[in-house]
Image (cartoon, helix red, strand yellow):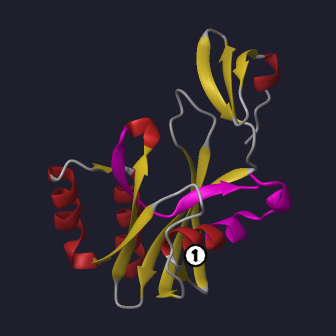
């Protein structure tokens, strides 16, 4: 992302991972440790969607999401390509792999408060090759849901008090578009 105005911004606080900035009276957050963000929408050959459920401390709740994460956020991954990060996150968090990874788009997560831009990928014909569950800092539950049942399943999760990341619905739009 081109942050040409960032250098004119006032840095109010810089933590290990985030900066809190102000530019022209607008306050926002910038992630200083990653070179990119990826999100993977996994679909099996049987037309099942792979969701993950994890407790998000910031939300004080469990959230239904797709596998996602940062690229280049560790020294050993500083030159990691976005596609490689997408494949890594798919395996680490969900335990799935694919040979069909389609780049969909880059989109801001919260354009009024953050510089973050997520790179969306559609992973077709995913196959389970591991257990998933995330790295040592994450506790992730993997769900495999038939495409035809996803909306009812998500509604049930909402009724149970969980949160659903709105990017889940964006992903379902792309699944519908590509699988028609």
The spot of residue 52 in percent (x, y) is 41, 65
Residue 69 falls in image quadrant: bottom right
Quadrant in the picture for the N terminus:
top right
Residue 50 falls in image quadrant: bottom left
Can residue 79 be seen at all in this image of the molecule?
no
Can residue 91 be seen at all in this image of the molecule?
yes
Side (left or right) of 19 relative to 177 = right
Residue interval drawn in magenta: 60-86
- Relative vertical location of residue 46 with respect to residue 57 in this rendering, above or below: below
What residue do we see at 63% from left, 35% from top? 115
Q: Which residue is more in the foreground, 119 or 144? A: 144
Quadrant in the picture for the C terminus:
bottom left
- Relative vertical location of residue 68 with respect to residue 87 in this rendering, above or below: above
- Relative vertical location of residue 4 with respect to residue 47 in this rendering, above or below: above
What residue do we see at 50% from left, 64% from top? 67
Q: Which residue is more in the foreground, 115 or 80? A: 80
The spot of residue 5 in percent (x, y) is 76, 23
User: Crowdedness of circle 1 by 10 Å Cα count: few (<14), some, many (20+)?
Assistant: many
**Badge 1 element:** helix
| Residue at the disc numbered 1 | 91
Q: Which residue is more in the foreground, 14 or 171? A: 14
Residue 82 falls in image quadrant: bottom right
């Amino acid at each position: 992302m081109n942050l040409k105005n960032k250098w004119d911004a006032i840095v109010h606080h810089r933590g290990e991972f985030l900066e809190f900035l102000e530019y022209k009276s607008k306050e926002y957050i910038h992630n200083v440790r990653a070179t990119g963000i990826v999100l993977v929408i996994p679909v099996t050959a049987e037309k099942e969607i792979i969701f993950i459920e994890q407790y998000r401390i910031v939300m004080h709740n469990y959230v239904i999401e797709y596998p996602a994460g940062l690229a280049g956020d560790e020294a050993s991954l500083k030159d990691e390509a976005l596609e490689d990060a997408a494949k890594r996150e798919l395996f680490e968090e969900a335990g799935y792999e694919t040979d069909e990874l389609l780049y969909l788009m880059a989109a801001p997560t919260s354009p009024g408060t953050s510089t973050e831009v997520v790179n969306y990928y559609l992973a077709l014909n995913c196959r389970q090759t591991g257990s998933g569950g995330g790295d040592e800092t994450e506790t992730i539950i993997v769900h495999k849901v038939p495409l035809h049942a996803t909306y009812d399943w998500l509604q049930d999760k909402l009724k149970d008090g969980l949160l659903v990341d709105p990017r889940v619905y964006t992903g379902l739009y792309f699944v519908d578009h590509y699988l028609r």
